[in-house]
Image: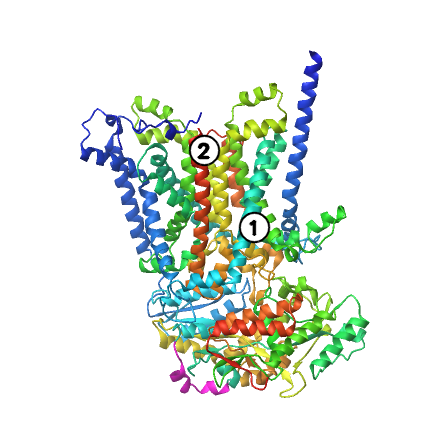
Amino acid sequence: MSRTARNHHPAAAPGVPPPHRVSPHRLVRAAVALAAAGLLSAAVAGCSGGGGNGGSDTLTVTYQQFGDSKVQANFLKSVKTEFEKAHKGITVDLQPISASEDDYYTKLQLQMRSPQTSPDLVYEDTFLINSDIEAGYLRPLDDHLKSWADWDQFQPAAKKAAQALDGKTYGVPDGTDTRALWYNKKLFAKAGLPTDWQPKTWDDVLAAARAIKSKVPGVTPMNVYAGTGVGEAATMQGFEMLLYGTGDTLYDPETKKWVVGSQGFTDALTFLKTLQDEGLAPSAKDQLAPTWSNTIPQQALPKGKVAIALDGSWVSLNWQKGGAAEWPEWTSTMGTTAMPTQDGSGNGKVSLSGGWTWAIPKNSDNSSAAWDLMKMLGDKKHELAWATQNVQIPVRKDVAADPSYAKANPTNEFFASLVPITDYRPAYSVYPRISQEIQAATESIVTGNASPEEAAKQYDEQVKGIAGDDVTSASGS
Amino acid sequence: MSNSLINGGSRRHLHKVAVDVALLVVAAGFVVPLLWLLLAAFDARAGVSVAWPHPWTLDNFASILTYETTYRPMLNGAILCGGGTLVTVFASVLAAYPLSRYHFRAKRPFLLTILFATGLPITAIMVPVYGLFVQVNLINTLTGTILFMATTALPISIWLTKNFMDGVPVELEQAAWTDGASTMQGLRSIVLPLMWPGLSVVTIYTFIGLWGNFFVPFVLLSSNDRLPASVSIYTFFGQYGQVVYGQLAAYSMLYSLPAVLLYLVLSRRLGGAFSFGGAVKG
Amino acid sequence: MTVATTQPPGTAARLRRGLLQGLPLGPAVVLLGVFLVGPILYCLYSAFTDMALTGAAGAHFVGLDNFRKAFSSPEFQQSLVYTLIFTLVSAVIGQNLLGMLLALLMRSGTSWIRAAVSAIVIGAWVMPEVVAGYLWSAFLGDDGSFNKILGVFSLPSQDWLFSIPILAVSLANIWRGTAFSMLVYSAALSEVPKEIEESATVDGAGTLQRLWSVTLPMIRRSITTNLMLITLQTLSVFGLIWTMTRGGPSNKSQTLPLFAYQQAFQLSQLGYGTALALVLLAIGGVFSLVYLRALRLEDGRR
């Protein structure tokens, strides 16, 4: 009963009208018209300027546009005006990329691949800059840096932020962030804890958490990010803040190998397990939600649901005027203190730093002008302005010492004081996968699926698979 | 006799009521998840959980209704997706005609390849496409992006259009041919009007797919003033992963509007959404 | 092509006719050829290399290594399982049955109710993936409406995204895609002549029996076609799941498209990710063949 034309067709095709009705002329005319249209549009497309990066008198600057925050856009616009006045004949073209982290990296890498689309100055996260260096996307800057007096003002740790395995430096950082313990002074008072809390060891931290649990019910004592849901936050604000306090590390820079089988790794996992088992940490399902790293600063902390949070220096950005969760009372409610090392030895304090750097792509067609712009962005005046406007931790000693910086935000001085002792991640090309294994290890602790020893062993196996020969056993483990 | 009539009548009435109830239950099930959108858009302190807004505010809408945040991306989206849909539908109708009416040896393998291609995740080919576009200077052009987006929608669109076209009997065309019309004229004046409901389905389906596509315009366009709304939605995700949920919800409501409007316009022309003239047949 | 014609069937004339008739295929073929064929071939090439978008320069041929790595990886096998569960639950069962139910119900019922329901169901369909993802995250979350509704019926509440993520994303996908099946089946049902159904009723068949033995068999082809299309579309669903769970927790909702994206773009293993995409394509091919065989059986039966 089907009425489809096909079923009515025998081998012959009666659907084809008798030839003298076809008027092939019309069909041919239509076809020619189509082809012409196609060619024309292709030509127009070609002429309408593909996405080239302008001539060598245009400096294309690419950076990540974070949300609808205008801070960086405004800052760079003022730098652009200043630069163009000082360098007549050069136009600065600001091209932000508005996307999530991963997509920003992807887009940037695609652009840097070919000279036609490569920007002249790019904003690289220290998380990924080493991968891009290894892929050959960036230019080494050592010759320039040698003759730049300002470079001495940069903290030694920060100078290494964009240093590759070959020892060359590929970027100039414009700021960084540090991590420490945020705690709710009001809840501490209720639990009988000192409001100027200064823990010296991990046990001190646990003691405070236990006091909160017993004296202030209904409040989660402590949050340490863990699991794959929140991504790198679990690795950097969470696990690495513990591991780097044990004396063991992820990576041995002497032998250039990744460390497995370290006692510190297991100890850090045990700390997380203690938090989980004793009910001092949030529920597993909360921790594993991808939105948790938003919920903590935007909901949990302002509402006093969490007493202690191991988090970053930027958290107060949320609470300022114009932030995602304005909270004017934060200055009197929240206190900050450094995360101690495991037993108080070494520096006594632990912090990890990330941050962004400016870099020049290899395929840039105006690298000397790009370097001039980079020098301007890296000088004292501009790094100070940037650090103040964006609540960045300065990487220049003179900026950190400047009184106007300390005045800009109550916690600035404290977080800046951590820079001398801070560590940068071993952000080499396999780091993202190593980081993912760390997150997986912490997740198995949080869900109770593995013991610290089992999770550490699983991590070791995975690292051997990822890093191949570049693996070494921890000394003295 | 009258008894059985009454029985039959009341049974039919009961049947109708039962159907109505069932439909309402299903509708309720579909509406409830939309609650978050409606509540968060008017909430000054929206989170990711469903909460009654306090305070109620129109601020979220006010802050996003700017040229840069909303109007321009929506316009770009309209150009990209509208243009892409037009190209796709045009090419599909043309391609479906020989596939539906004629026999040729390559037909089955061609159809199979097309079907196969509908399963391809487009993200997988974006890196070589980027390279291709750079080489032929189509990168960062609206035209190039429109053409590519149209191409990604082609396979399933061809398949659907062919099926709808199969439902229009050849006899009607033959009548037109005997009156002196050419094939193309027959296509335009007989076949197309009869498969209009099917074409509407194809148009909507294509437009929705393109309207929600983020990755393709993201990769192929670099100038911010050319990006469509599907990419601009990321303006609500800040540094360090902060999300402004209230604005995101407000934006999402506006973002869904064009697709909903398109459906309303087309379904009105359908004259009652479900009186399709053509059937989907294999 | 053989044709009954009054003109001498010379080869040149036949060829010209064939070309003219095939001409409408032109625009589609050009677009597909320029934009899809080349990149797909390139992908086929890169699946056999260790190409990375970053972290290493150049690409080296590694033969079947990527595929070997995939098939021996438990994460890959898990993603296969989740993909199959997701497709079966949300498309083959969920969208299909719900769409059919709606199409059947839509044949009767008050007209304003029909209009409202269709508008709502289609509204869910037109909503962009990312938005639908957030919607459902909120709906199924701890404080979400779903738990509140369960509370009304005194059923246990939990964070569904955490406990059974694959089910959660399947539900979201059913919500999102049912409209398509509903439209297809409505069209197909409108083709079924009323007389046949009414004669079945007169013969004493009850509603369900009539449905099963008379109505459904008449639209068998549409059912198979619809299943084929929605299976293929569901296999490559990415945005919805990504927004809702990122594939977690513990990869418990990580289907193959998510796994491939993670490998290709988050971990920059482009060669590996492309190999995974090809596996996905192959799975789609297998499903297509199964459905096409079913369709051909239909052809034969008629």
Q: Residues within 10 Å of mark 2 (few under 14, many from 20)?
A: some
- The percent position of residue A339, horizontal first and vertical second, equals 66, 80
Q: Quick check: can you spot residue C183?
A: yes
Hey, what amino acid is under mark 1? Ile
What's the residue at 51%, 26% (across, down)?
A: C192
Task: Classify mark 1: helix, strand or loop.
Answer: helix
Q: Which residues are magenta?
A: A139-153
Magenta region, mostly helix, strand or loop? helix
The dot on residue C85 is 1
- The percent position of residue B36, horizontal first and vertical second, equals 65, 51
Q: Which chain contains the residue that carries disc 2?
A: C
The dot on residue C298 is 2
- The percent position of residue B248, horizontal first and vertical second, equals 59, 55
Hey, what amino acid is under mark 2? Glu
Q: Quick check: can you spot residue A147?
A: no
Numbered marks: total: 2
